[in-house]
Amino acid sequence: MEKNRVNILILSAGRRVELVNCFKAARDRLGIQGAVVAADASPLAPALYFADEKELVPYISQNDSYVNSIIDICNRYDIDLIVPTIDTELLLLAKRREQIEASTKARVLISSQDVITICRDKTNTQRWLEEHGFLVPRMISDEDIETGRAIYPLFIKPLDGSSSINAYRVESRDELDTYRHLIGKGRYIVQDFMEGTEYTVDCFLDMDGGIITVVPRIRIATRSGEIAKGRIVRDEGITKDVERLLTILHPIGHITIQCMRTDRGIEYIEINPRFGGGAPMSIAAGADSCENLYRLMRGEKLKRSYSYRDNVTFLRFDASIMLNEDNEPERP
């Protein structure tokens, strides 16, 4: 018998109003009962006010308190699936998944700790990609820099960064030294600067790592490291190469992969084993990871799907809500 009540907990909800609404729309479209609960450390996180229920949690850095608050929320709301959304919570959840799942009836939508360890450290990602025959920009060592073997422009970013924070194109040794000092000794990776067409690839895999959807989109414009304008494209070369990557890496759930088509071929930038900020674009185009998760949670088996719209363009924009004197939302 299919399970027809599924409660979802979205962690670090922040500004992910689109994602909250995508889960609610998929639930209603499938005729499933249940709540979408959003949690965040800030009471001013906009997505809280679009969920069915909202909860405040400690900061992720307070490891035990954060995990205990998740367990408490899961038991109070009878949560079936926990959905992380930001990089900084992934390793903690991977390490504590067994504790959370043993203390609740919920499943944590997180890949194995080995996968998270590969993806969360840019040096680990680089080495894994190289070892498995995928193209990446050349990594520049401190020795290359000191001996003058590095050829500018270069690119520097934090080992565990996200949203393009402290990620810079570097034109000279003086600039590089400035950014190395800013990020911190031993906390950065330096690579050759890539030029080409940048893609984000939204992927969805079932709980056994079976590939369900792979949807490339061109990053037309970004703001604060997150896509602002994008176009869905059917690119067979990128799709096949990403499928090969996913088969070897074996993650689960929604995965966001960034790559670039350059003169050398398809070069990879990073792998984010979570919903990216632009995931609602692929969802709206027909590769609905939220609907897929509901179907999996109610016991359905999914098959590989190529059914999504091609050559559609998305333009993201800001919106606002007003909280009244009692901190309750008033929407237009």
Image (cartoon, grey):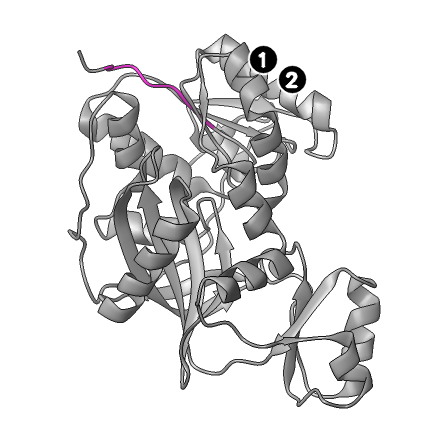
Q: Give the image quarter of residue 281.
A: bottom left
Q: Main secondary structure of the magenta part?
A: loop
Mark number displayed over residue 64: none
**Is residue 251 or residue 28 the one in the foreground?**
251
Q: Nearer the viewer, residue 159 or 331?
A: 159
Question: Residue 268, image x and y in percent?
Answer: 47, 67
Q: Is residue 287 visible?
A: yes
Q: Is residue 220 above or below residue 55?
A: below
Asked whether the viewer can see residue 224, the reply is no
Q: Secondary structure at mark 2?
A: helix
Q: Are marks 1 and 2 in contact (CB under 8 Å)?
A: yes
Give the left or right position of residue 142, taking residue 331 as reference. right
The image shows residue 174 at horizontal and vertical percentages of 81, 85
Residue drawn at point x = 38 percent, y = 43 percent: 254
User: Residue 162, percent across and down?
Assistant: 60, 55
Label 2 is placed on what type of residue?
Asn
CA separation, marks 1 and 2? 6 Å
- In this rendering, the answer to whether 256 lies above or below 169 is above
Looking at the image, which residue is at 58% across and 31% down?
93
- Per the image, the residue denoted by label 1 is 72
In the displayed structure, does residue 244 sit left or right of residue 68? left
**Mark 1, residues whose alpha carbon is within 10 Å: few (<14), some, or many (≥20)?**
some
**Bounds of the magenta span?**
3-9
Disc 2 packing (10 Å; few <14; some 14–19; many ≥20): some
Residue annotated with mark 2: 68
Where in the figure is residue 237, as x and y percent of width and height?
27, 70
Q: Secondary structure at mark 1?
A: helix
- Eyeballing the image, is 234 above or below 204? below
Give the residue type that dot 1 points to. Answer: Asp
Q: Quadrant of the N terminus?
A: top left
102 is within the stretch colored magenta = no
Q: Is residue 5 magenta?
A: yes
